Amino acid sequence: MSDLWQVYAVKYAERNARTRADSFIFDDHPAAAHGMDYFVWVLQNGSRTIVLDTGYGMDEAKRRDRPILRDPAQAVAALGISAETVDTVIITHLHYDHAGGLDLFPSATFHMQVAEMAYATGPCMCHDTLQMPFTADHVCEMVRHVYSGRVVFHDGSGQVAPGVRVHCVGGHSRGLQVVEVDTETGPLCLASDATHYYENFLQKKPFPIVADVQNMLDGYGTLMQLGKTAARIIPGHDPLVTQYFPQFDQIDFAWRLDKGPLAKADILKI
Ligand SMILES: [Zn+2]
Ligand SMILES: [Zn+2]
């Protein structure tokens, strides 16, 4: 078993009826269109598969009127992965689009941060604005998994497997964690919603769904420490990822991340 991992981004939804005001607290062109892609990520090392986040399924799509292109379990099946048998899932945070598919992974142990469970079940959820990105059923489902022994909590930095480390950055959600993965080309930082877009962290422009702006801005610095260069930091929702990285194996909704971006990708020009 190798401690070096192959890493894939798998897209399951997109939402284009939104503007730059939905992506940046301060922006010169707030009414301009700004699309968003939704991903889960897959780590493989030859003998082991780890899935990062679970997306959301048809029920949640209907509830929020945010249709999906494909069920996240079907999406990872295209890579030859049976969601039913995956034993390790990292949950970056409990927002509906990351923890909405817990039931798709019935054999999994879920890795999450102590601070995220405290936030999602604590007094901040008395505020409509703060609870908006959460769905109570997903949070309750995770609480039940705690009681049945299927949750591993990390408090800050921790190791999920050799070569796979998590780090709590907070900001967007109180216990948001990012994932640092060792690959043949060096460590890769899967940022999830620590930076939705390249522009958030490169231009230090906070995303409007935020629990703590200072932690979000500090988190942009943490990403650079972990990834070293922008090319090794993967934003959670940026459609540019699908242009910058090579498509994987003729699957038009999967991209391979660990070999680095395509030569034509000019990430720092953002
Ligand atoms: Zn989020
Ligand atoms: Zn998200």
Image (tube, grey):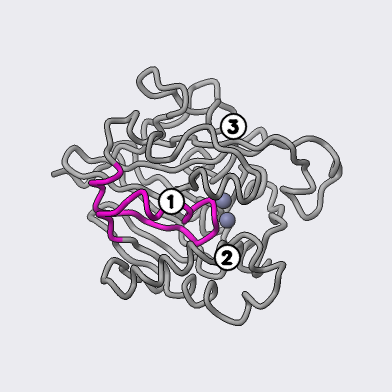
Q: Nearer the viewer, residue 34 or 216?
A: 34
Q: Is residue 256 above or below residue 104?
A: above
Task: Identify residue for label 1.
Answer: 101
Q: Are marks 2 and 1 in contact (CB under 8 Å)?
A: no
User: Of marks 2 and 1, which one's residue comes earlier in the chain?
Assistant: 1
Work out which residue is located at the far left of the displayed protein and give it. Answer: 1
> Which amino acid, by three-letter code, is at mark 3?
Leu
Numbered range of the magenta stretch: 83-109
Callout 1: 10 Å neighbours few (<14), some, many (20+)? many
Q: Is the residue at mark 2 in contact range of ligand 1, meaning its CB lies under 8 Å from it?
A: yes
Q: Is residue 84 magenta?
A: yes
Which of the two discs, 1 and 3, sits closer to the camera?
1
Residue 54, position as x, y percentages in the image: 42, 49
Q: Which mark is residue 173?
A: 2
Going from the N terminus, do you reach mark 3 or mark 2 first? 2
Residue 240: image tag: 3
Q: Quadrant of residue 142?
A: bottom left
Circle 2 residues within 10 Å: few <14, some 14–19, many ≥20: many
- CA gap between label 3 and label 2 equals 23 Å
SS category of the residue bearing label 1 = loop
Q: Residue 27: x percent and y percent?
A: 82, 47
| Image location (x, y in percent) of residue 171 | 60, 65
Q: Nearer the viewer, mark 2 or mark 1?
A: 1
Picture residue at 27% right of the left edge, 71% below the top: 148
| Residue type (three-letter) at the residue carrying disc 1 | Gly
Query: Which quadrant is home to the N terminus?
Result: top left
User: Distance from label 1 to label 3 (Cα)?
Assistant: 24 Å
- Of the numbered discs 1 and 3, the one sitting upstream in the chain is 1
